[in-house]
Amino acid sequence: MPAAPSVDHHHSIISLLEGVRDFNVRVFPEKQEMFSDLAAGQSPHTLFIACADSRVSPGMITQQPPGAMFVLRNIGNIVPAYGEMLGGVSAAIEYAVVALGVKHIIVCGHSDCGAMKAMLDPEAHGLDSMPTVASWLRNAETARAVTAALHPHAHGADAVAALAEQNVLLQLDHLRTHPAVAARIAEGPLLLQGWLYDIATGKIRVFDGQTRVARTLDEALSALKGAEPA
């Protein structure tokens, strides 16, 4: 018979359970009123589409409380064009826009993205042994082609960063093919933004969903605050 797992083997799950205990004992009581309100329903202002990478924590990055963002995560922060691969991503977008009435949609890519690395060098990253991942990443193939045309000599981290940027821009384009998103844009304000998060520095670059212009965080804030009515 196989040996029973040791305590060391269970260290990670023990850490998770102890974290829940700390939440129950210390954090939850301090925020009990907030959680009581959340128990009655949700009204998030933003749909946040992020990569599933464990190093990317949307709530921590944005410092938003529970209930503020409807978070959708997948490999490579991808939004298939409508009709290409209808499923959980399309359903989540439709629900966020129609049922929840979110005011903003953010597509957030990041540095050192494993999905982007696999697209640039499928063999080295074992894509042949992950056919489902390979099929999913075809939704970003146009970004890979654009990156190759614009940055033919880029390699290593520079190539990954360039592809991550083009992927964010492509997924913003894909968002507009979804009927619920297109209808909301036609009816009134629905802000689309692309973000690129640098894990090493904590900084983001912001891409306007309409102009595709890249801005620093401060530039994006200034532009948005300047657009607000006096």
Image (cartoon, rainbow, N blue to C red):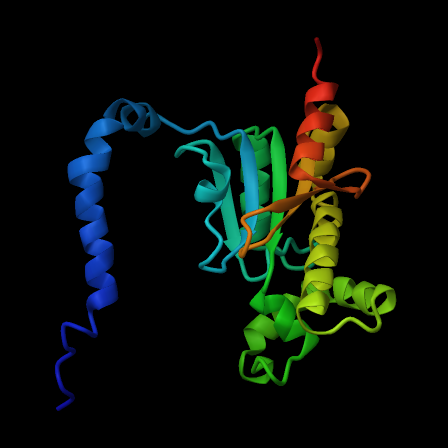
Residue at the limit of the structure toward the top, as seen here: 230
Q: How many marks can you see?
A: 0
Residue 108 appears in the picture as rendered: yes
- Can you give x and y, in whole percent of width and height, for residue 17 in the image? 20, 54
* Residue at the (69%, 59%) spot, across then down: 84
Answer with the quarter of the image where residue 9 lies: bottom left
Along the viewing direction, whichever of 73 and 186 lies nearer the viewer? 73
User: What quarter of the picture does the C terminus occupy?
Assistant: top right
* Residue at the (51%, 53%) spot, across then down: 73
- Residue 71's place in the image compared with 80, above or below, is above
* Residue at the (64%, 59%) spot, across then down: 85
Residue at the limit of the structure toward the bottom, as seen here: 1
Residue at the limit of the structure toward the right, as seen here: 149
Residue 191 appears in the picture as rendered: no
- Can you give x and y, in whole percent of width and height, for residue 27 in the image? 23, 35
- Can you give x and y, in whole percent of width and height, for residue 224 in the image? 70, 26
Relative to 72, is 144 on the left or the right? right
User: What quarter of the picture does the N terminus occupy?
Assistant: bottom left
* Residue at the (27%, 22%) spot, across then down: 33
Answer with the quarter of the image where residue 86 lies: bottom right
- Residue 107's place in the image compared with 42, above or below, is below
- Can you give x and y, in whole percent of width and height, for residue 72 in the image? 51, 48
